[in-house]
Amino acid sequence: MSRASPKQQFDCPTCRELAQGKLRAHVRPGKQALVANHGARLTVEADCSVNIDKGLQPVRKPNEELKVFDYLVVSSETCDAHFVEVHPASSTGEVDVLIRKKAGTEQLMRRAGVEVRGEWHWLVDGEGRVNFKAGDKYGLRLRDAKIRQPQRTLKIP
């Protein structure tokens, strides 16, 4: 995998900022930061991507157990940031897990000096069932947390 460096040229300001900050060792061109089978289910022309779970390790405090989203992907077309979590949606309890992961991601990103702005996406892992709907209380909790409803494939403009 090629690594971004401060000299790496990205088109989007967000990617240039990330390549200069504390996550720089994990900023990759395109979708290169994504695990292959995850990237295959995500349609986007990406300027850069970051495995934020790995990238945020250095800013964790000893024995801190905050969970975070898997990836940050920046669209080449819009330069918008998209946080992506690949996670099963097989039980309603997973909604709370995603909400906690979003909060953990926001906390550690701020600690890393990264402005947290963007859309939050849930990419369903595997072929399991999604056991709630957008209009039920679990779907509404996701909406209120500003996390998009779970999807098996994701298309980002």
Image: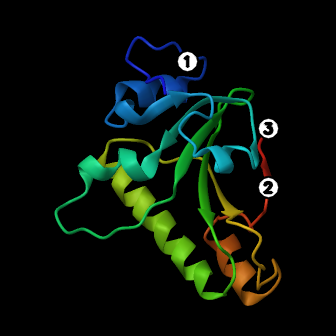
Location of residue 4 by image quarter: top left
| Image position, residue 21 (x, y; %) | 34, 31
Instruction: Give the secondary structure at mark 1.
Output: loop
Q: Along the horizontal axis of the image, is 7 left or right of 98?
A: left
- Cβ atoms at labels 1 and 3 below 8 Å apart: no
Instruction: Give the secondary structure at mark 2.
Output: loop
- Give, as a three-letter code, the residue at label 2: Thr
- Give, as a three-letter code, the residue at label 1: Phe
Q: Along the horizontal axis of the image, is 145 left or right of 101?
A: right
Q: Which residue is mark 2?
A: 153
User: Which residue is rendered at x = 25% and y = 57% of the image?
Assistant: 60
User: In this picture, is 8 found above or below 120?
Assistant: above
| Disc 2 to disc 3, C-alpha distance | 13 Å
State which quarter of the image contains the C terminus.
Answer: top right
- Cβ atoms at labels 2 and 3 below 8 Å apart: no
- Give, as a three-letter code, the residue at label 3: Pro
User: Which residue is rendered at x = 36% and y = 31% of the image?
Assistant: 25
Instruction: Give the secondary structure at mark 3.
Output: loop
| Disc 1 to disc 3, C-alpha distance | 17 Å
Q: Which residue is mark 1?
A: 10
User: Which residue is rendered at x = 24% and y = 68% of the image?
Assistant: 64
Closer to the camera: disc 2 or disc 3? 2
User: Which residue is rendered at x = 44% and y = 48% of the image?
Assistant: 52
Q: Which residue is mark 3?
A: 157
Location of residue 91 by image quarter: bottom right
| Image position, residue 32 (x, y; %) | 57, 33
Local crowd size for mark 1, using a 10 Å CA cut-off: few (<14), some (14–19), many (≥20)? some
